[in-house]
């Protein structure tokens, strides 16, 4: 029988042995009741965008979630939207799913990948999506929504129009009437609150990938300046800061709605971002190394805050390594869900940490974009080219280590991390990105379109 297996980074010397998924879960500890789960995914939002991480921007409501829960200092997404979204939805690395960059989202199909929503649905959760599904695919109809495991969805339809003002919105396969004053993030918030009210007896799972704060950076309903021009400047009074403030405001409104319904003790709120991108990329006035689309620390290091009132220890800060694929096993464990057989997962649960336990933190995490990748542990990073970096000053700098370095620590790290990459073997999987069409191909397509219109 082909048993479902996953890659587990513990212990390090056996980091990549495929082990039974049952080993993910402790059997000797009492399991709390299934929590409702709200997974908020901000768009293009790295750690410099959050006040409690030492960022420039003011985020009192997000900071409040951290103060009442757990703030993870070292969570790693992919450095682009589609690969990150595939990681958290499917729990598998890009070389397995084929979602290598923003041009390969269609590689993940519901008959090939099993989303975490579908797993939770099978254990009795009501499930919904609100926000951005792009750059993934196959979510235009109610039937496609159910194929992914969503009972309901309200998503921005990138193919039909804008995401913010007078947005193109698809609700369960049908267009939503909007006006010039309709603001996309408000519509998503209202849908989420309404869904929760209708399923307040739980359990429910809400995947909430808000379009904020991805460009174009326009005014928000709270912006004092008129017009809808792009952001100018990077300070507290810029439109960019207005967008972060509005994201923070909606987080606060959602928490208030849960309080009003007496659901906080029953609900896990997870807040994160899909890549490390903000204009003022500083932490405590030091510049973060890298940004969106780069395989530097600033490209993938994102905020991760978990708040489950009465369960997560208030004010705890953890340096545990967390990868974006880990949400899958974590949510499954909390729900008591069985993972599908016949697939290899790259997901390690951090559910014990959410319950205040030490857990078994990762010893390494893996990041890939296209045909480039690296594996990183507590203090070192090794790329697909064999380049080793000292990460002791991360996220502000990475220090290259010469191949002939005689440091015992560096040599031990190189050997260990190379062993991880050898067993992962990404090169044997999907590594080819979508090729851009040549000028000749583009011209032929234009001529074909003209001939069809003639």
Image (cartoon, rainbow, N blue to C red):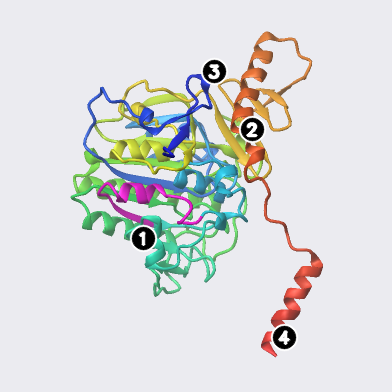
Q: Do the CB atoms of the residues marked 1 and 2 lie less than 8 Å apart? A: no
Q: Do the CB atoms of the residues marked 2 and 3 lie less than 8 Å apart? A: no
- Between disc 2 and disc 3, the foreground one is 3
Name the residue that disc number 1 marks: 146
Q: Pick whichever of labels 1 and 2 is earlier in the sequence.
A: 1
Q: Pick whichever of labels 1 and 4 is earlier in the sequence.
A: 1
Q: Residue sitting at 52 percent across and 67 percent down?
A: 162
Name the residue that disc number 4 marks: 451
Magenta-colored span: 109-129
Name the residue that disc number 3 marks: 13
443 sits left or right of 331 in the view: right
Q: Residues within 10 Å of mark 2 (few under 14, many from 20)?
A: many
Residue 128: say if magenta: yes
- Between disc 1 and disc 2, the foreground one is 1
Q: Name the spot of residue 453 as percent of width and height, x first.
A: 67, 87
- Between disc 3 and disc 4, the foreground one is 3
443 sits left or right of 65 in the view: right
Separation of marks 1 and 4 at Cα, in angstroms: 38 Å
């Amino acid at each position: 029988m082909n048993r479902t297996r996953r890659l587990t980074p513990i212990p390090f010397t056996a980091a990549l042995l495929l082990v039974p998924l049952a080993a993910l879960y402790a059997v000797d500890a009492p399991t709390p009741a299934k929590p409702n789960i709200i997974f908020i995914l901000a768009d293009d939002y790295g750690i410099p965008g959050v006040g409690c991480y030492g960022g420039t921007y003011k985020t009192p409501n997000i900071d409040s979630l951290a103060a009442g829960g757990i703030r993870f200092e070292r969570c790693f997404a992919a450095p682009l939207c589609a690969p990150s979204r595939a990681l958290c939805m499917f729990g598998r690395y890009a070389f397995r799913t084929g979602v290598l960059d923003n041009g390969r989202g269609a590689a993940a199909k519901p008959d090939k990948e099993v989303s975490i929503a579908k797993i939770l649905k099978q254990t009795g959760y009501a499930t919904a999506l609100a926000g951005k599904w792009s750059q993934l695919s196959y979510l235009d109809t109610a039937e496609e929504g159910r194929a992914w495991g969503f009972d309901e969805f309200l998503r921005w339809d990138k193919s039909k129009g804008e995401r913010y003002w007078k947005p193109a919105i698809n609700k369960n396969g049908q267009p939503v009437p909007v006006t010039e004053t309709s603001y996309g993030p408000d519509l998503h918030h209202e849908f989420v609150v309404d869904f929760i009210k209708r399923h307040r007896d739980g359990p429910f799972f809400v995947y909430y990938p808000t379009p904020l704060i991805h460009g174009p950076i326009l005014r928000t309903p709270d912006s004092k300046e008129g017009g809808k021009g792009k952001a100018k400047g990077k300070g507290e009074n810029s439109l960019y800061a207005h967008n972060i403030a509005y994201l923070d405001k909606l987080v606060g409104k959602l928490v208030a709605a849960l309080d009003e319904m007496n659901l906080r003790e029953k609900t896990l709120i997870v807040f994160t971002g899909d890549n490390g991108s903000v204009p003022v990329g500083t932490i405590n006035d030091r510049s973060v190394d890298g940004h969106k689309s780069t395989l530097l620390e600033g490209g993938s290091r994102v905020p991760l805050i978990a708040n489950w009132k009465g369960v997560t220890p208030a004010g705890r800060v953890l340096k545990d390594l967390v990868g974006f694929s880990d949400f899958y096993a974590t949510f499954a464990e909390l729900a008591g869900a069985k993972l599908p057989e016949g697939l290899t997962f790259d997901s390690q649960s951090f559910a014990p940490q959410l319950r205040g336990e030490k857990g078994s933190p990762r010893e390494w995490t893996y990041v890939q974009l296209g045909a480039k990748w690296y594996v990183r542990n507590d203090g070192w990073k090794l790329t697909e080219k064999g380049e080793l970096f000292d990460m002791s000053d991360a996220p502000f700098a990475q220090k290259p280590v010469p191949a002939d370095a005689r440091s015992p620590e560096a040599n031990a790290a190189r050997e260990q991390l190379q062993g991880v990459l050898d067993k992962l073997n990404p090169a044997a999987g999907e590594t080819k990105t979508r090729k851009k069409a040549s000028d000749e191909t583009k011209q032929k397509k234009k001529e074909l379109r003209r001939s069809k219109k003639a």
